[in-house]
Image: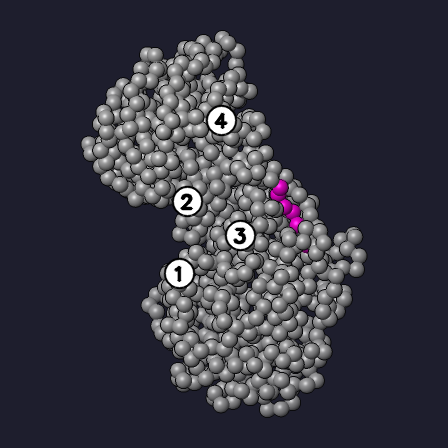
Amino acid sequence: MIIVVDRQDPRYNFLKLSRNQRWPASADEAAANIDLCDTAEATAKALQRIIDAGNRPTVRSGGHCYEDFVVNNPNGTIIDLSLLSAQRLPGDGDRYRISPGQQLGEVYLDLYKRYGVTIPAGTCYTVGAGGHLSGGGYGVLSRLFGLTVDWISAVEILTVDSSGKVVSRTVDKSREPDLFRACRGAGGGNFGIITGFLFDKLPKAPNEVVRAGVSFDWATMTEERFVNILTKYGHYWETRGKDPETWGLFAMLGLSHKSGRRFGLSLQFCNPDGTCRDLSVVHEFLDLFESCDPTPGAVALPGESRIPHHENAGQPCPGERPIRKMLWLDATVHGGGSAGGQVRAKYKSAYMKRNFTREEAKRIYKHLTRDVPGADLRNSVVGVDSYGGAINRDALAEETGICQRSSIMKLQYQCYWMDPKNDAGCLQWMRDFYKDVYGAPDVESKYAGTPYPSDRYDGCYINYPDKDMLAYSFWPQLYYGTGDLYPFLQKVKRRYDPNNVFHHAMSIRA
Amino acid sequence: MNRRTFLQSVACAPVLGAIDPLTLRAQRADPAFAYVGTPDAICVFAIKPRNWTLLETVPSPSPSFIAIQPGGKYLYAANDVDEHEGIPQGTVEAYAIDAHSGHLDFLNRRPLSLSATRPRHLAISPDGKTIAVAAGGGGVYNVISIETNGALGKVTGIRKEVGCGLHQKYQSAAHPHSLVFHPAGEYLVATDLGCDRISSFNLVDGTLVRRAGFSTRAGSGPGALAFDPSGSVLYVAQELRSSISCHRYHGDTGEIEAPFQRISGDTLAISRDGKFIYSARASESTVSAWAIDPISGSLSQHDTWQDPSVFPCGLYLAAARLYAFDKWSGAIVQLSVDASTGKSGDATRVARVKSPRVIVTI
């Protein structure tokens, strides 16, 4: 079934929007139609119709794209897959299926209830699987299990051949392996429309997890103590955090702006066997920060938090620390984040291979403690996620579209605000902040202002796209590395989308 | 179209009144200024009988095609670029022309839609209110409104093309190449070099709606095109086969018939009185004049000019002068043509610029 929603339809005013309220930036950029498709066959039909009419399709699953890649489609058509949520189809056999329209929360519930397995994907319940998995599928269990794309066995995808005909393909390691690899992490809106992800196996879901955290008061914070906190955190992931025993530990240091009054560190942990019988790793980690004058307990942070703050969730663990234990599914679904939405937002990202330098930490401190006229920074945060563990298997860089396989932390710069009048101030603060952090004197001058791949950085994450990076001619290397991945993706693009039917501001340029 | 209707349409050509005033002026009077697109600028020349004088060099990113609005007040340039401010899109620039000095005043630069990269041709509607752009790189047509002050307004229409052809190097995807408005203004005809296609579009609410089309021979690569003044014959250069095909055109429906004749040539220019067509072949260093039969529209070779040191890759006809340019040597050669016989007379090298890509005069 295809439901065509045009400008006269009352649903149009909702469906034309991104969750990031900045998009579409103007009425001129809005799509003319939204085609809601609930099967792969309907999607193919809608796509062919759009192409035959000389229109441009963009594709949406959950609508969480940070930039305007979907909804900036002037007079074009958005193919909306949020109703394409089949959980099983005839012929799936023993394989697990995830449809692009499924929300991550639904995926977790379904996989767990049916099979007791899961995917190591994101926290937000309402994020759509289509875009999330196309760009990597990273989350709280990724240090333990890797990225979701590492587990994908086959992809069902609609492409458009050189003559303009829609072609339905199932690709895997033996059938069109080049397209299969590209679909495992290169990002959405590049090669076609994915209508199904198939998995031969998936990891067993943990039984239980613990959550804990500490927070720090901006009122009493000093630059020296701030630097100490960041470097202690980074040092852990650079050293002890590489031990497989710790891979069940995921932490997020949420560095909010001082106008948010406190910043904090949150963690989720389970032992590799999916239990919480031995919490020594957690205690060892939290002990690191004892000398930093922490306040026990996590703090609520703005936007999408990897480990959402729920004060009374779960049961307290014995001991002095406020560590709470809960069932994994409860923590993942019921305690899942709501991930922004209905606000204006800007995001940036950086992979780090090494601990923070003192200079970097000082620069972060400077921007988090300065006031900017015309910018509401109360809901601004740099989320420093732990990384590595099972993700960092070199061979997977060759098998998938994610080449960042040696980082220990992944930073997500986030700013949320409501009033469009704050746009300019917030955006400029983000730009100045980011440029400064990666603009220290020891950064190679031609790459200054970016985390260009080096012995310290490994670029940016395509699922946190940032159009500001387009100002650099080397933006593809920021997202796809300096090796053969981007040329490979260009080759795939030329072969499977020769007419560049699927495109946006940061799509693969063949 | 039968012979009778063809004759009728030829006969009513003056009534159609579709020839823009600028062109009529160019037919009647010697042009005063020339604008030449080069890889990084628009060069403005004062036209002298034997030698052009460079007036100014206006920096512009790869102006691959230039057109002057009917009335001659504004000039528009397509910028053959892959990206603008980091976004994969080409651009079009607008300039005001100083009628006395010929100088250009920059008005604005309008980014095209996403993926509308490498625009290499544009056409201005007879009413001067709309520009259609062929962006060969991304396989996209754009329609842009022109504001009353000549500046470029919004992109009102985006048409994404798909297709391919035989030639692996040039035809792996759709590559819109050139556009021309039918003299009556109702249809816009466009060639797509990438997929051997000629299309007739209507402009509907600022967008392009395809009404009819014709598939040229596989691997032919249709490119430059022109109507005869009546709009009943369409001449199309098949760039990948170095030929020019002649098609009857139905101005009431937009239909394009199969060619009734083919001649050799890479590109073409047509005299506005519809008596002669000129073709150029760079590989043979020739420019040929062809007489157009007023009854049948068929062509007969009339005259050929050849200079082994010039490889003409583009033509522009202004009054009694035909300009041929050689993008390799940079030479711009002026051929005097006899308006009554179509024959070329003196050949003069009037200017030399770096890699000329387009010439217009006023």
Say which residue appears at 54% left-offset and 56% top-offset: A486
Answer yes or no: are tags 4 and 1 on the same subunit: no
- The relative height of residue A158 versus residue A123 in the rendered view (above or below) is above
SS under mark 1: helix
Q: Amino acid at mark 1?
A: Asp
Q: Chain of mark 3?
A: A
Q: Amino acid at mark 3?
A: Ile
SS under mark 4: loop
Front residue of A167 and B31:
B31
Front residue of A373 and B15:
B15
Given contact means CB atoms under 8 Å apart, are the residues at marks 4 and 1 in contact? no
What's the distance in space between the residues labelled 2 and 4, CA to CA?
26 Å
Q: Is residue A483 magenta?
A: no
Q: Amino acid at mark 2?
A: Val
Residue bounds of the magenta highlight: A154-161
Say which residue appears at 50% left-offset and 57% top-offset: A476
**Residue that mark 4 sits on:** B242
The answer to whether any part of residue A294 appears in the image is yes
**Residue that mark 3 sits on:** A508
| Dot placed on the residue nearer the N-terminal end, 1 or 3 | 1
Q: Amino acid at mark 4?
A: Ser
What's the distance in space between the residues labelled 1 and 3, CA to CA?
28 Å
Say which residue appears at 70% left-offset and 84% top-offset: A277
